[in-house]
Amino acid sequence: MRYRPISQDLFVSNRKRLIRLLKPGSVLVLNTNDIMPTNADGTLGYRPNSDLFYLTGIEQEETLLVLCPDFPDKNFREVLFVREPNELLEKWEGHKLTKAEATARSGISTILWLSDFEKWFHHMMVMGGVSYVYLNTNEHYRASIVVQTRDARFIDWCQSRYPLHTYERAAPLLSQLRRCKQVEEIALMQQACDITQKGFERVLRFTRPGVMEYEIEAELIHEFIRHGSKGFAYTPIIASGANNCVLHYIENNQPCKAGDLILLDVAAEYANYNSDLTRTIPADGRFTKRQKEVYNAVLRVQRAAYTLLRPGVVYFEYQKEIEKLMEKELLGLKLLDKTDIKNQPKGSPALRKYFYHGTSHMLGLDVHDVGNMHDRVQVGSVWTIEPGIYIQEEGFGIRLENNVVIRKDKNFDLMRNIPIEADEIEDVMNSR
């Protein structure tokens, strides 16, 4: 574990809030993620299931949580099942959690070995007054299910073995809880943003014409890891020249040339919580007049969005307001004219040629975090604000992105200390 230990109080509180949402006579089961193969005997880097981590703080593979709030024996109302350590396993894979360590992290007093699961779960299902079984699935609105998850396999097993219980969806409840962050979660996300700041400022001092995009990537990962992050919160986008008109450009294999802009959509994670930064910088340390005009237009829209994304707003209505502001900026930049606006097809506004993505998404344990985008924005949720203008005919695009906590009085910018003004970026790049 690279990060400072998180108080078990956070996970105890999260479980208590979840239990209050369950029906009487319920059991809830959450599995961690699989370790995914590559080729031969290789595996991808392991990442814990966000929901399981949210409720337990446990990152170890092959972990399983059972909540049965009405079980007659109060010692078995919360049970965490983990892999049993043995000498051979630890020689190959290193230390595995003891029962005491699992309790210390999660606040769950009853820790059992995974091999005991079926016996205890059967006892709960038939002797614990259980009528409702809450199981978890990935219900994110952007989810693309291409592999059968550990949760999906468990659903098949459970429904075949206990077909007469009533099954309920855990995902909407966890989504509801995770949407609004606790104070401790905000602190972890601030740490992720602070580490991202260190990486970005290193890049400002490093970048010059002739460096490769992947060299910038190397500078970032160096700074992230040395400050306790496991690395990038998502695949980094380091897009120079015309590449920065491609939203998800990830090759990062081109040279950065004098006169180019470099779009950096890069950020660190910390303790499994994510940040999400975008900045656009000049390869040679100076924006051209035209680049700065477009840059400042994007910055004006971003700052307006900061004041518009407030409690009670519906995201899709907010997006429409942002598009009105963007349309005005595009007219001012002479990228659109009034005829373009007048002749635009219904449902296909002319501005989409230059601004072709949403302005915001929720952020947390997942970069595109859970939560219903049709609900009203809530106090305590964390959102990105990331407008952009992409001008393919001029060979450059600009996007700027900060992360904000929605508060009752005024939003709080987790990236308030990261340079964003064009003049500020130039000053840092030319002071090395």
Image (tube, helix red, strand yellow):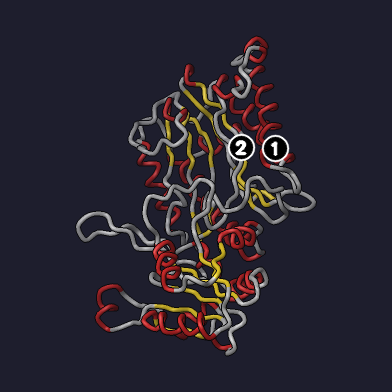
Figure check: 352 above or below 93: above
Provide the residue designation for mark 1. Answer: 318
Mark number, residue 67: none
Q: Residue at x 58, y 40 (%)?
A: 401
Q: Position of residue 187 (x, y in %)?
A: 62, 62
- In the image, 346 versus 159, the foreground residue is 159
Mark toward the start of the polypeptide (2 vs 1): 1
Mark number, residue 359: 2
Q: Position of residue 214 (x, y in %)?
A: 35, 40
Pointers 2 and 1 in contact (C-beta within 8 Å): yes
Can see residue 43? yes
Q: Is residue 209 left or right of residue 123?
A: left
Q: Position of residue 200 (x, y in %)?
A: 50, 45
* Crowd around label 2: few <14 · some 14–19 · many ≥20 (10 Å): many
Pick out the residue farthest to the right: 409
Q: Position of residue 179 (x, y in %)?
A: 63, 56
**Callout 2 secondary element:** loop
Tell me which corner region of the image, top left, top right, bottom left or bottom right, holds residue 67.
bottom right
Tell me which corner region of the image, top left, top right, bottom left or bottom right, holds residue 147.
bottom left
Quadrant where the N terminus is found in the figure: bottom left
Circle 1: residue type: Tyr
